[in-house]
Image (tube, grey):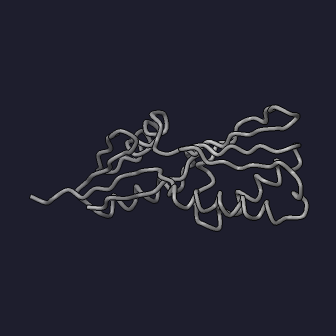
Amino acid sequence: MAKDSSFDVVSEVNMQEVVNAVNQTKKEISQRYDFKGSKTTVDLESDTIKIVTEDDFRLNNVADILKTRLITRKVAIRNLQYGKVEDAAGGMVRQIVTIRQGLSAEIAKAIVKDIKSSKRKVQASIQGDSVRVSGKNKDDLQAVIALLKENDYDIELQFSNYR
C-alpha cells in the first residue's frame, strides 16, 4: 500500500521580522527632517501596530515607511489590515494596523471548496487555522499548490509540513 503524501496550507507572519520593521520605522521617524518635533509614535502590541501622529499627511508617511520596512524584511503586507483613521486626544490621529495570522473559517472553507472542485484525487480537511491536503500522487499535490497560488484569498498563503 502506498503511503499518502500531505502538506499544510497556512498563513503565518514572522513576528520577529515585524518587531524589527517597527523598530526601523521608529528610528527613521526620529531621523527624518519632516518629523522633527512631531509627537509621532509607532507601537507594536501583540498582533496590532498602533500609529499615532498629528495629521493625516504624517500618518500616510508613517504607513508608507512601515510598508517599506516590512517588504524589505519579506513580511507579507497582504496580512495587514488597516483600520480607519480615528481622532485621538490632543488633536492627534490614530490608526490601528492588525496583523492577520492563520486562516479564518471562511477562507479555509473556500480553499477546501476550490480543492474539491478541481477534481484532483486529494483530500482536504480543515485543522484549526490551517488546511491539510493529502493524496497518494505527489503530482496532484503540486497541482493543488499551483491552483491555490493562482486564486486570490486576500491573504498570503504558505505551504508547509510536506510529507
Q: Is residue 163 above or below residue 127?
A: below
Task: Judge from the rendering whether residue 91 lies leftward or rightward of residue 4; answer left or right.
Answer: right
Task: State the residue in front, 127 or 138.
Answer: 127
Q: Residue furthest left?
A: 1
Locate residue 3: give its quadrant: bottom left
Q: Residue at x 68, y 43 (%)?
A: 50
Q: 85 above or below 12?
A: above
Asked which quadrant contains residue 88, the reply is top right
Q: Nearer the viewer, residue 4 or 137?
A: 4
Q: Residue at x 38, y 62 (%)?
A: 142
Residue 141 % position (x, y):
34, 58
The number of numbered badges drawn on the structure is 0
x, y percent for residue 21: 63, 61
Q: Position of residue 51 (x, y in %)?
A: 73, 45
Q: Nearer the viewer, residue 118 or 146?
A: 146
Q: Is residue 90 left or right of residue 122?
A: right
